[in-house]
Amino acid sequence: MSHTDRPWSVPTAILLMGCLGTPNTTIHENGGAPADGAVQGPHELGWTLLDGWGEEHTFGRSPLRPTVVLHLSASPKETVPMFLFEGFADDGLIDDLSATPLRKASEARRIAATTEVRGRDVALTPLGPLTRGQSYTVCMAGGAKTTDEQSFAQSVIQEVTVGTAEDAGVGTVDLWPPDGATGLPTNLDEVFVRFDGRLSTRAPLAESPFWIASDDSHLTDGAQRVVCEDIGWNGGECFRLPLQQEASPLRTYRLRQGAMLLDSTGAEITLPPSSFSTGQAQDTMAPTATTLACALDERSIHGLCVLEDDESISVRVRFLKPVRLFWFIGDLVVARSIAPRGEALLDLESLPPETTFEGEIQAVDAAGNRASIPLRVGTTPRLSQVSIAEFLTDPTGP
C-alpha cells in the first residue's frame, strides 16, 4: 500500500492520537530529524538505514536485510523497546506503542529482529530477509528510559519499503530438482541452484561454495555460473552443480553450504535446508501431460487450456512429474517456468490483435527426458472499449 492509499495523512494521524488521549507520536516516512529542533528532554534526532557494508540507503528502497539506526539525544538503556512490524503503522499500532507489552494483534505483525545499543544510537536488524516491495514499520515505543532514568516522552515511528531490484539482496534460494521432490530417478541430468538476487563481487566465490550430498557421499562437486533463463527461471543468479556420480536409489540428498556467502548488499546468506529423494530406478520416459478440464472461456489444445484475448495468451499445463517448461515460438523462448509439481501457467502479454503464433511447449524432466507439444494459438480481434459512467439525478426534477 502506498502512502496515498492510507485512510489518513500523517498530520491527521497525530491529531487523532491526541484526541484519543494517547502519547504524542512522531511518524517519519523518509528519515531525517524532527520538525521541531527545540524539543525538551530526551528525544530522537533522526534515522539512518544501512546495508551490510555500512553504506546508506533511502527508506523507500531498502535492502532485504537492512540495519535501521535511530539516533537519540541521550543514551538509552540496553533494554530499549525497539520493534519491527509488517506493514505501515495504523491507529491501533500507534495506540499500542504507548506501553509494553504489546497487544496480541500487534505482536502478530512483529518481525523477529536484533536490537543493539551503540552509545546514543539504537540499531535494529531483522533476523532474516524481508520481502521485496513490502512495507514495514520500525519504532521505539513510548516510555523508553535513558541510562539516567529519564523517559523519552513519545514513541517514534519510521516507515521502510524494501526495494524490488536484484541489487536489494538475496531473499530466496531455489533448487532443481525441486526442494521436497520424492521418487526422483537415479539418472539425474542436471542440478541447479538459483539466488533471487545478486551475490557479492567484493570477494571471489569459493570453488565449491555449496554442493549436494547424502549422509555418506557427495553427489556434486564445484559450481558453475549459468544463465537463469536457460534453466527455466526468470532473473536471479544461477549455478550449475556438476554431477560427479549417479545418484544412489532410495537416498535423500541435501543442499549443503561450505564457505560463507554474502549478497551484493553485504548480508550473509544462509542456504535453506533444501533436499530431494530418489526412487529405485532410472527414468527414460518422456514427460506426459495430463488432459485438463478447461473453463468456459478457455479452449483445449492437446490437453492444455488456452485463454486468448486481443492482447494476451495464457496456457495452463500439467505434467505428471516435475518439469522445466519452455514455450517456443520459432527459435525464440517467449515464456518459461519451473514446475515442481508439474503444473504451470505460461503467459504472453502486450501482443497485437488478430495475430497467430505457431510454436511448441517443451518440457524437460529431472533425468533430461524431453517432450514437445505443438501449439498454434492467436489473439482475437480488438475488443470494444467499454466505458462506465455514474451519475445521480433528482427524482423531483430541477
Image: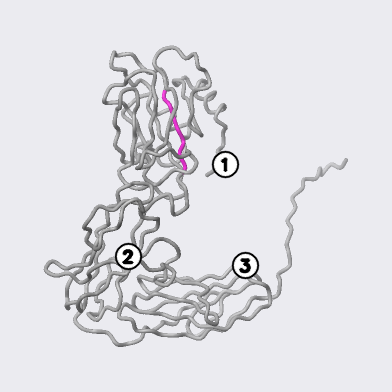
Q: Is residue 147 left or right of residue 334?
A: left
Q: How is colour applied across the structure in the image?
A: one colour
Q: Give the alpha-carbon distance from disc 1 to disc 3, as whole Å.
A: 28 Å
194 or 389, nearer to the observer: 194
Q: Is residue 191 above or below residue 45?
A: below
Q: Residues within 10 Å of mark 1 (few under 14, many from 20)?
A: few
Q: Which label is found at residue 193?
A: 2
Q: Amino acid at mark 3?
A: Ser
Bounds of the magenta span?
155-161
Q: Amino acid at mark 1?
A: Asp
Q: Amino acid at mark 2?
A: Val
- Looking at the rendering, which quadrant does residue 283 occupy? bottom left
Query: Residue 126's spot in the image, x, y percent?
Result: 33, 41
Q: Give the alpha-carbon distance from disc 2 to disc 1, as whole Å.
A: 38 Å
Q: Which residue does the numbered mark 3 point to in the structure image?
A: 350
Give the main secondary structure, helix, strand or loop, of the magenta stretch: strand
Instruction: Tell which circle, 2 or 3, labels the residue nearer the N-terminal end.
Output: 2
308 or 144, nearer to the observer: 144
Secondary structure found at label 2? strand
* Residue at 35 percent of width and 26 percent of height: 121
152 or 271, nearer to the observer: 271
Q: Which residue does the numbered mark 1 point to in the structure image?
A: 5
